[in-house]
Image: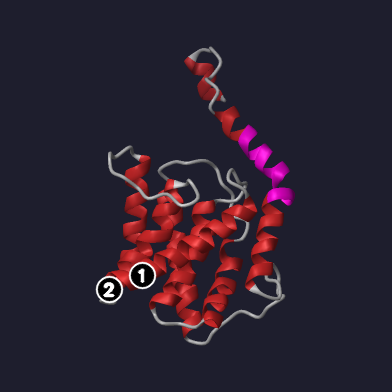
């Protein structure tokens, strides 16, 4: 089921990045986040034999978490919202699909955060499909751990005392600590797109 969820989410992103003429439901005005935060929930709900209401509740929770995180990291963030926001949303939605408790949802969020914290955004492209696949797997596996009673200890590393404070730490890091690295990455990306200066083929080979 995890492999199928990853495949469907990645396929949706790949189709969108390839320009396939199909609608995609956005989340916080982000099409790839909309795909990444919903398709894994849809696949799991169908595989578990759940009805439309359970699936829609799972998607709603996944989207609410993703929106809350994007609100903190910004709409044009230094962190990858497809991996950071959507993976956390998928973790929460997965717990809800399995009938988990509010505490298990929080534990799933805390289990997810250290695995996706600080993943940089390097623009929308086909490779986002692979990143969404990775985030889907992380979110579902973190949720399954929470459902099994496994959780990471609070206040370790990037984790704070609770999930909301940990998400605030993500936002503060994205909005302030990663600003310079985001600018430098953008400079490098634009620099490598500049055309080669005119030179002989032999000289270019030597470089």
Q: Quadrant of the N terminus?
A: bottom left
At horizontal 61% and vertical 67% (from top left) the residue drawn is 114
Residue 186 part of the magenta-drawn span? yes
Question: As displayed, is residue 194 above or below residue 161?
Answer: above
**In this picture, is 48 found above or below 90?**
below
Quarter of the image that includes the C terminus: top right
Name the mark on residue 51.
Answer: 2
Residue 164 vs residue 170, the one in the foreground: 164
Write down the quadrant of residue 136 in the picture. bottom left
Name the residue at 52% across, 59% down: 66
Residue labelled with disc 1: 2
Mark 1 lies on a secondary structure that is helix
- Name the dominant secondary structure of the magenta segment: helix
Q: Is residue 41 left or right of residue 206?
A: left
Q: Residue at x 66, y 75 (%)?
A: 162
Does residue 1 appear anywhere in the picture? no
Q: Position of residue 27 (x, y in %)?
A: 46, 52
Counting residues from the start of the chain, the first of labels 2 and 1 encountered is 1
| Residue 15: x %, y % from top left | 32, 45
Q: Residue 132 location in percent, x, y?
A: 44, 55
Q: Foreground: 184 or 51?
A: 51
Judge whether residue 46 can be spotted in this image: yes
> Mark 2 and mark 1: span between their CA atoms?
19 Å
Magenta range: 175-187
């Amino acid at each position: 089921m995890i492999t199928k969820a990853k495949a469907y989410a990645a396929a949706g992103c790949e189709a969108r990045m390839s320009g396939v003429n199909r609608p995609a439901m956005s989340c916080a005005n982000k099409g790839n986040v909309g795909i990444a935060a919903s398709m894994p929930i849809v696949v799991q709900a169908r595989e578990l034999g759940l009805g439309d209401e359970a699936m829609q509740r799972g998607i709603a929770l996944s989207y609410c978490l993703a929106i809350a995180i994007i609100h903190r990291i910004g709409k044009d963030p230094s962190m990858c919202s497809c991996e950071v926001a959507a993976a956390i949303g998928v973790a929460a939605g997965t717990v809800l699909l399995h009938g988990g408790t509010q505490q298990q949802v929080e534990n799933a969020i805390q289990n997810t955060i250290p695995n996706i914290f600080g993943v940089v955004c390097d623009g929308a492209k086909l490779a986002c499909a692979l990143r969404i696949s990775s985030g889907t797997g992380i979110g579902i596996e973190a949720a399954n751990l929470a459902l099994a009673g496994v959780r990471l200890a609070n206040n370790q590393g990037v984790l704070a005392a609770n999930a909301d404070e940990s998400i605030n730490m993500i936002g503060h890091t994205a909005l302030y600590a990663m600003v310079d690295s985001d600018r430098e990455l953008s400079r490098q990306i634009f620099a490598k797109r500049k055309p080669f200066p005119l030179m002989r083929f032999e000289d270019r080979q030597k470089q």
